[in-house]
Amino acid sequence: MTDLDIANAAQPLHINDIAEKLHIKTEDLEHYGKYKAKLPLSLIDDKKAQKSKLILVSAISPTPAGEGKTTISIGLNEGFRKLNKSSIVVLREPSLGPVFGLKGGATGGGKSQVLPMEDINLYFTGDFSAIEKANNLLAAMIDNNIQSKTNNLNIDARTVKWKRVLDVNDRALRQIIVGLGGTTMSVPRETGFDITAASEIMAILCLTDNLSDLKARLGRIFIGFTHDKTPIYAKDLKANGAMAALLKDAVKPNLVQTIEGNPAIIHGGPFANIAQGTNSVIATKMGMSLADYTITEAGFGFDLGGEKFLNIKCQSAGLKPEVIVLTATIRALKYHGGKSLEELNIPDTDAVKKGLPNLEKHIENAQKFNIKPIIAINQFTADTDEEIQVIRDFAQQSGIKVAIANVWAKGGNGALELAQDVIETLETTSKDDFSALYKWEQPIEDKIETIAKTIYGASAVEYTAKAKVDLKRIQKLGLNHLPICMAKTQKSLSDDAALRGKPENFSLSIREIEIASGAGFIIPISGNMMRMPGLSAHPAAEQIDIDDKGHITGLF
Amino acid sequence: MTDLDIANAAQPLHINDIAEKLHIKTEDLEHYGKYKAKLPLSLIDDKKAQKSKLILVSAISPTPAGEGKTTISIGLNEGFRKLNKSSIVVLREPSLGPVFGLKGGATGGGKSQVLPMEDINLYFTGDFSAIEKANNLLAAMIDNNIQSKTNNLNIDARTVKWKRVLDVNDRALRQIIVGLGGTTMSVPRETGFDITAASEIMAILCLTDNLSDLKARLGRIFIGFTHDKTPIYAKDLKANGAMAALLKDAVKPNLVQTIEGNPAIIHGGPFANIAQGTNSVIATKMGMSLADYTITEAGFGFDLGGEKFLNIKCQSAGLKPEVIVLTATIRALKYHGGKSLEELNIPDTDAVKKGLPNLEKHIENAQKFNIKPIIAINQFTADTDEEIQVIRDFAQQSGIKVAIANVWAKGGNGALELAQDVIETLETTSKDDFSALYKWEQPIEDKIETIAKTIYGASAVEYTAKAKVDLKRIQKLGLNHLPICMAKTQKSLSDDAALRGKPENFSLSIREIEIASGAGFIIPISGNMMRMPGLSAHPAAEQIDIDDKGHITGLF
């Protein structure tokens, strides 16, 4: 059975019944069909939220199929609920692009999924579309202003940094020329499209608290310079009010359910390789207002999502997680131990051992934030007892708890050990344990170096000539105080996707640096990262179908 | 008070109560908040639909502000309801682009509006976004196939006709070059973006009956040719299943309410200047299944929306309207009589008289389909009794009914005379009266000439060299049997926006001809029409804002 088959076999409750489990009144819900609802921001209760324990689920460096941190997050929530704890899982929304690309859905797997699976993967409540519209309205207003004779801010078209976005894996849009066709059309210039998840508007939505802060952040978006070198922001184009109006519903988090009928909140933010990559502050605070234990996720690996969650989101919103669950698969450890993707089902304790340094580095990284890590082994049927024992031995030597989580096959019943481990650990921790890795006030290059050396294990950082120019621009704009949101491959701790395990003696190479002054961070782009993915030779879209009755197949 | 103020002052009913007025059960609704719901296609009942009287509201050639045909349609429905008739109004969805451009909203005006006004204008239930995604997924799959080494259909990039779409007025995207950046990126080629309403997917959604027909039509979309001149369709890329999956909710019509609490269906299809421009067949049939009188609209003027509604949509779906309500304003008649926009509030019976030939031509056009026209004067406060008398005299001479509709100020009470006129007329008509203007089987050039000469009043049709090549391509592809969906300015009966009134002795100039083989029509582009609008120098977006409590201002 595929994930979609399992999801379709489930008997979901009406969303009113899910809301009731959180003591939310039906009239407070904004329904999107029978199984989805938006929650009003008025349900956020800061006092209650401060008492909720925040649990961050992340992962080691994943195989291309992912480590299953969403599956573990959902399963862990089911486990908490089986133990009669007041808990909630707060996830980021899937991006549509990859659903049609290589990867399929991003709503968990097996018996640890959120429902309705196909809606959440395909379209959901339209948050991404609203973000896309706000992003592209600003772009249109920029080119319109450049073209306009009577309302012209004297923008130098060659300096415009704002890109358009689409939630499609469309590599042909990475580098384009717009505005062709002569004087009645527009001013030709080079630009490009990013994927919607990489839009600064997505980051703004994820980091904001309320509508007036949202509008202020939108106004602070950096556009480019005038011909006389004055910086231009979105507020200079009077674009931020209309953009905020477009986001009026997108800013509200979405309530759905797990296969076992437990509440889940999904809102904002995938892709920690090219974006901040965690769900919204509003969603996390909403979850914390509604439950004693709030489980959230940040990936791909802890080096990307975890680091950004802690240094950007937690520092920005005053959140303090107390436990980090590091998801690992035996498959990934063998992969880091040098085996090919085709060999991962062959039992091989030696390969698992050789892969351990990757896990070890992610544990060390979690500890640098003074938060206790727990290893969750996301169990696969091919895993042998001997292979699992390798990790148990390693964990015992390191003094780290490890739990086998068979949540794909068993749902909450497969996460009881993990849930117990988390609860026990939380009895020994305090919110005040958390310490960020760097201070926002440090110089940009210091912050980049701290992440590169401390988290990735790089020996040095190299900047291209373009990146050096970008650094000067950041200085000139007075944006040195912003935190860092690195774009880096998820496949390696380094910026070279081919280097598995725990790479050493490498330089992190910064190609260029983008400014997200509205979101409030700086984006150094390392290695050959692209902020617009491509489709594979045989895209997943080719297999997706719908029958006369509206049943979808091929979403896996 | 602005339209938004009036809309906000209304006390809307819960959508369940609106559904109840149509005898629809709450559990059949897919809610989108408290005031919007999608209707399942299972509610369409062909037998009931055949008994419903279909009333088409169109207009004379409008001023840039529009003639108010949506306002009249809504007001007329309120009038029917005041007379205790079972009626429904079925409208097309507003396009987001122009909301931020010049025009503001498109949800009626004054006391004849649909609610929630700001939702319907801004984002609604995401239908346009789903269409956009399906359109752009196909585009990405085309460029991906051209780039692919292992799954290559040998498409000649220079022949690709499929464009991307965005629901933004963004003239910089009209002509672009994509695929720059070298061999790992894509194959560079010229292309462009249209506005989403002009997407062939929109037309397919508007003309389809059900999911399997939808999928078949999506598969028939023409893409371009291989290097050895074989035509390529969307089904060759295996794109149609995934595209249909993306449209699974968009295909369902949306139920909302009028200010007076009466049911309204809104679904698909604006912009009859650059697209087919009427709401969906599914929505019209849904309306006809639920009420004895179904009021729908097609504009801008009858020459565009009306002609396409009758020749394309009615012939395709077997619909037979029995009355055409031609909306006219005193303002527009003065405009056609030679007055400038600034002079339209000055009483001037001579100018009204001079503008009558435009009205007369639209009446004559309606009669060519053997359907009885009724003139509805959309009353403005500046209109004088003398000016109105000019139209009354003209109508009497022509034997046409005329009603003054003060629906902006009075809602349904302002449409009682109009509703009575429509009901009286319907007592004398039959569905079998309707006759289409041309047969689909006629040659393409004959069909274009028929529309140009009979409807627009052209003396001849001229084709550019490019259009002649396009005609040969249509011939070669065996698509001669498709009907015509002309792209032409709404500002004039001719293809020259500057020619007001009833232009004569002009040639209709066809610049190029696009193929929409999935939707099932051919798009000759006349004059200097663009299928992607631009923003004005001071876009409406500059005035739009939202406050801390989520109240939007500046949507007018």
Image (cartoon, coloured by chain):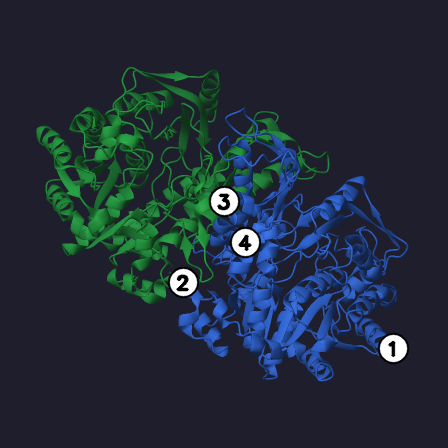
Chain colours: A blue, B green
Residue B369 as seen in the image, left or right of residue A26: left
> Up-down: is A306 above or below B351?
below
Quarter of the figure with residue A164: top right
Instruction: Give residue A388's position: percent from left, percent from top.
Output: 80, 73
Q: Amino acid at mark 3?
A: Glu
> Up-down: is B405 above or below A279?
above
Labelled disc at residue A484 = none
Kindly report which numbered mark, 4 or 3, lies closer to the viewer in this rendering.
4
Characterize the local packing of mark 3: few (<14), some (14-19) or many (20 or more) Cα atoms within 10 angstroms.
many
What SS does tag 2 mark? loop
The reply to whether residue B126 is visible in this rendering is no
Q: CA distance from mark 4 to mark 3?
A: 12 Å
Labelled disc at residue A397 = 1
| 1 or 4: tag closer to the N-terminus | 4
What SS does tag 3 mark? helix
Q: CA distance from mark 1 to mark 3?
A: 54 Å
Residue B49 as seen in the image, left or right of residue B252: left
Characterize the local packing of mark 1: few (<14), some (14-19) or many (20 or more) Cα atoms within 10 angstroms.
few
Labelled disc at residue B132 = 3
Label 2 marks a residue whose chain is: B
Name the residue: 39% across, 62% down: B31
Name the residue: 79% across, 43% down: A468
The residue that label 2 is drawn on is B33
Quarter of the figure with residue A370: bottom right
> Front-most of B436 and B199?
B199
Instruction: Give residue A149's position: percent from left, percent from top.
Output: 50, 30
The residue that label 4 is drawn on is A128
Q: Amino acid at mark 2?
A: Gly
What SS does tag 1 mark? helix
Kindly report which numbered mark, 1 or 2, lies closer to the viewer in this rendering.
2
Name the residue: 67% across, 77% down: A415
